[in-house]
Image (cartoon, helix red, strand yellow):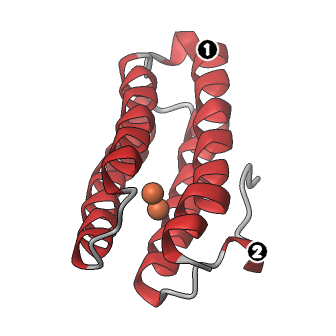
Amino acid sequence: MPIAIWTPELSLGVASLDADHQKLIDTLNLVFDALLFDRSSSALNSALTTLDDYVTEHFAREEAWMQARHHPDLARHQQEHKALRDHLALLCASRDLSDQERSVELLMILRDWLLGHIAHSDRDASGA
Ligand SMILES: [Fe+2]
Ligand SMILES: [Fe+2]
């Protein structure tokens, strides 16, 4: 059951970053499924590790893309990325399945934050 869906309104018109955002949304959905339906800690840990790794990879790619364009908002954008990483660290720290309700709540916060960031900050940065 998806908790986040890619829509064309999220597109930046930059193929590599759009592909990253779609993969991040897919991975958020994997974490949610593992959290609610799989109930094995190995599936959840694996989905969270995938998400954490891909967030790191995407942020580096996006920041390099901005840096190459001497984007004036780079420092502020990096701070926003750090805020998402902080949310993700909280989620990873509460990966104990007995704390499922808190983990779902954190995941929803992460989803809202990520979709809002793509729709506003990333779009502004790309000029889309
Ligand atoms: Fe992004
Ligand atoms: Fe971003």
Q: Residue 77: where, in percent of width, then height?
A: 40, 50
**Ligand 1 within 8 angstroms of badge 2 C-beta:** no
**Residue at the extreme top:** 98
| Vertical position of residue 105 compared to residue 46: above or below | above
Mark 1 and mark 2 lie on one chain; the one further toward the N terminus is: 2
The mark closer to the camera, 1 or 2, is: 2
- Residue 102 is labelled as 1
Q: Residues within 10 Å of mark 1 (few under 14, many from 20)?
A: some
Secondary structure beneath dot 1 equals: helix
Q: Quadrant of the C terminus?
A: bottom right
Q: As drawn, which residue projects farthest toward the front?
A: 72
Query: Residue 57 has which mark?
Result: none
Q: Which residue is mark 2?
A: 9
Q: Position of residue 45 (x, y in %)?
A: 36, 36
Left or right of residue 40, residue 127 in this image = right
Determine the CA span between mark 1 and mark 2.
Answer: 30 Å
Percent position (x, y) of residue 66? 32, 70
The kind of residue on which mark 2 rests is Glu
**Ligand 2 falls in which quarter?**
bottom left
Left or right of 68 on screen, residue 85: right
